[in-house]
Amino acid sequence: MSPYTFASSPGPTLGVELELNLVDAQTLALRSGVVPILESLPPELHGSVKPELFQCYLE
């Protein structure tokens, strides 16, 4: 069971998210390294920026 509570709405809704890819500056290939970025975020962003399935994506 999900720890989140979702409320229903009478009409359709739209959610927007931004997904970022981490790219190596030399090769332009996708690069792992999301953990140091997440650890360096200010506390007020900890709930807003999340890792994705792969270590080269942020949401």
Image (tube, grey):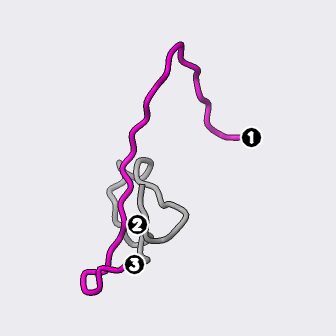
Q: Secondary structure at mark 3?
A: loop
Q: Nearer the viewer, mark 1 or mark 2?
A: 1
Q: Is residue 51 left or right of residue 8?
A: left
Q: Which mark is residue 29?
A: none
The structure residue drawn at horizontal position 32% and vertical position 75%, both measured from the top left corner, is 23
* Extreme residue in the right direction: 1
If the image is split into quadrants, where does the C terminus sit?
bottom left
Instruction: Report the Cα–Cα distance between label 3 and label 2.
Output: 17 Å
The structure residue drawn at horizontal position 48% and vertical position 61%, both measured from the top left corner, is 51
Which is nearer the eye, 29 or 39? 29
Q: Position of residue 11 (x, y in %)?
A: 50, 16
Q: Is residue 17 magenta?
A: yes
Residue 46, placed above or below residue 11: below
Q: Position of residue 17 (x, y in %)?
A: 39, 45
* Extreme residue in the top direction: 10
Q: What residue would you read off at disc 3?
A: 31
Hey, what amino acid is under mark 2?
Glu
Q: Is residue 52 magenta?
A: no
Mark closer to the chain start, 1 or 2:
1
Q: What is the magenta range?
A: 1-29
